[in-house]
Each structure stands twice: as C-alpha cells, then as structure tokens.
Image (cartoon, helix red, strand yellow):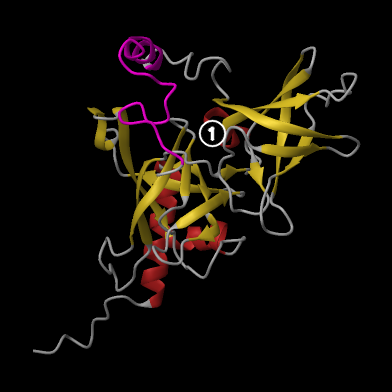
Amino acid sequence: MPRNVYFKNGKTTEQDLYEDIIIEAIKIYGYDVFYIPRKIVKRDGILTEDLISKFDNAFTIETYIESVDGFEGDGKFLSRFGLEIRDQVTLVVASRRWNQLVSRFGRVGTSTKPREGDLIYFPLTKGLFEIKFVEDKKPFFQLNDLVTYKLICELFEYESQEIDTGIPEIDNVQSDHSQGYKFKVEHQGSPPEVFGIGEDLTFTLPSNTSPSPTATAEMLRYETFEDYTTIFVGPITFNDSNNLSIPVGTIITLTNEERSAIAEVTYAYDLGDDDEDIFLNDVNVQNNEFAETSSMFIDWSETNPFGEPYNTNNP
C-alpha cells in the first residue's frame, strides 16, 4: 500500500530545525577539539599508501563524546613488541558545522566529509587521535536527512610526519618523538667558527639526481674537540619529500647563510633521551639490560651476528 500522501516525512523546515537542535546539543554537552587535515606529500602508486604526509593546519570544532564510559578499543596490553596502547574514542560532529569550520577553510582534496587518516587533538586528555573510520549514516536518515558524522578514532602513532600547525601542544608531538642527528665536522687547519645554537641549518645529501636533495634542521648544541666539532640537530625536514632518515656514515654538506662545512653523520638519537644511550630516560625499556646480557654470547661487531660473516666477493 502506498504511503499516505498527506504526511511528509522530512520537509526542509523540519530538517533544518532538527539539525539546529543537534548542533545546539553538541555545543552544550560537547567539547572543543582540533581537526587536523592530513596532506599527502608523496603517495605509493601501487599500494595507494601515503609514504610521506604532513599536518600543517588545525581547525577548532565542537564534538560530542559518545564514549561516555571512557576509552574503547583494545586499551593497554602487552604484545610481542612490548606495551601497546590502542585507546579508541567515538566523536560526533554536525555535518553543517564541519562544512562551516573545516571544509571551506583549506580542506585538502575534494572530500565533503571528514576523512580517514586525519587527526583529532583532544585537549581534555591531551591526546592526539587518528580517524580510523567515518560513519555517515547513523542515525539513519532521520527526517530523510543525514546531519552528523561519527568519527571512530584511535590513539595516533607518530611515524616521522611533519607537524607544524602553530599550536605548541600539538607540534610538540613531533619534537617529543622525532629523531635528532649528530654530525662530525672535521677541522681544516684551525677550528672553524661554529654554527650558532638555534640556527636553521641546511644540509645537502649525496645523490645521483640533480639537484641533490636537501634538508633543514635546528641546531641544538655543539661540542668542540681538538680535530673536529660535533653538532647536534633536532627534527629533520626534507625538502624533496623523498627521505625520512639519514643513514649513519653519510657525508653531507652543512650550510647556513654565511658558512658551510663538510660533515659526517655519526649518530641518530631520540630527542627526548640522552645522546649517549638511546631511551635512557624511559624506565620501561630494557635495551641496556638486553645489550649487556647478549654481549656474552652474541658478537654485535659482525654485520650478521646470527650467521656467517658477509662475503663481499660472494654475497
């Protein structure tokens, strides 16, 4: 039997009123978060994965926390790789507010809704979450309209992305988890004038391509010895978007606006830890204990400590 033609389920005025009520409720019971779009710098054309991405903008938007009983997901558990934290949270955002506050202000791509891979910074818990799934059909066509998005988010695992949103508590994620590098600059004759602390240094990497790839980093400190100077730098920003790390032993050209020097990468370290012992400040890590114990039966000086020495003539 056909539906009653005298009753219309979802007039425009009713839909607008329903959406206004949803938005007002979120404004009353929700929390402000920062929506951080992901910019794909380099994509894998075969697996369609982002090889390099960055986050350079953040938008404030109100959301409702659907996970009222606390974080969901797998939570904290011990795996073969150690302690893992997989907290999840479900946030509800009004589609109209997302279009007003995010989509029309520099949203990357042609998507008209939140996108998986973007980040949410949650000031309430000071956590940075990655959107794993966007549910756009719940509630299912109330008054013949879809007015909210449900964002299923999981605690973000930092993987060398560049984060420069201009908001210190968000940008600190990069400085807290990035690797720094130690360069050895040999003296030519008398010791050269050292680079200034806080300077942005540019270094050119060896490459078969032209022009050679370059990177920049802030100089943190230095140590001067009789024949060389050791320079410590912070997070690396690669200008050609092709590198995420620099192998130890690489010879680079280190420059600023006035001086230049030939340097060798001698060490890579975590910025939050002591430069002599990786993860020294983390009491939960046992790398030093494992290294001392294993040195009694494993020769770590060999390239392959578990097999025969590598033969360069017959690999």
The secondary structure making up most of the magenta span is loop
Task: Give the image location of residue 302, x and y in percent.
Answer: 42, 25
Asked if residue 118 is among those painted magenta in the image, a careful observer would answer no
Closer to the camera, 276 or 76?
276
Q: Is residue 292 above or below residue 265?
A: above
The quarter of the rendered structure image containing the C terminus is: top left
Q: Could you tell me which residue is drawn at 38 percent across and 45 percent down?
A: 64
Task: Give the image location of residue 25, x and y in percent.
Answer: 39, 49
Task: Give the image location of residue 279, x and y in percent.
Answer: 47, 19
Image side of residue 82 versus residue 200, left or right: left
Q: Residue furthest left?
A: 1
Q: Secondary structure at mark 1?
A: helix
Image side of residue 135 versus residue 313, left or right: left
Closer to the camera, 201 or 108?
201
Task: Give the image location of residue 56, x and y in percent.
Answer: 62, 49
Asked if residue 294 is among those painted magenta in the image, a careful observer would answer yes
Instruction: Name which quarter of the figure residue 12 lies in.
Output: bottom left
Q: Is residue 145 above or below residue 254?
A: below
Instruction: Name which quarter of the figure residue 154 lies in.
Output: top left
Q: Could you tell me which residue is drawn at 53 percent across and 52 percent down?
A: 52
Q: Which residue type does callout 1 highlight?
A: Val
Label 1: which residue? 173
- Are there few (<14), some (14-19), or many (20+) residues within 10 Å of tag 1? some
Q: Is residue 160 above or below residue 17?
A: above
Closer to the camera, 132 or 248?
248
Instruction: Name which quarter of the figure residue 259 lies in.
Output: top right
The quarter of the rendered structure image containing the N terminus is: bottom left
Segment tinted magenta in the rendering: 287-312
Q: Could you tell me which residue is drawn at 54 percent across and 44 percent down?
A: 161
Closer to the camera, 151 or 287?
287
Image side of residue 155 versus residue 230, left or right: left
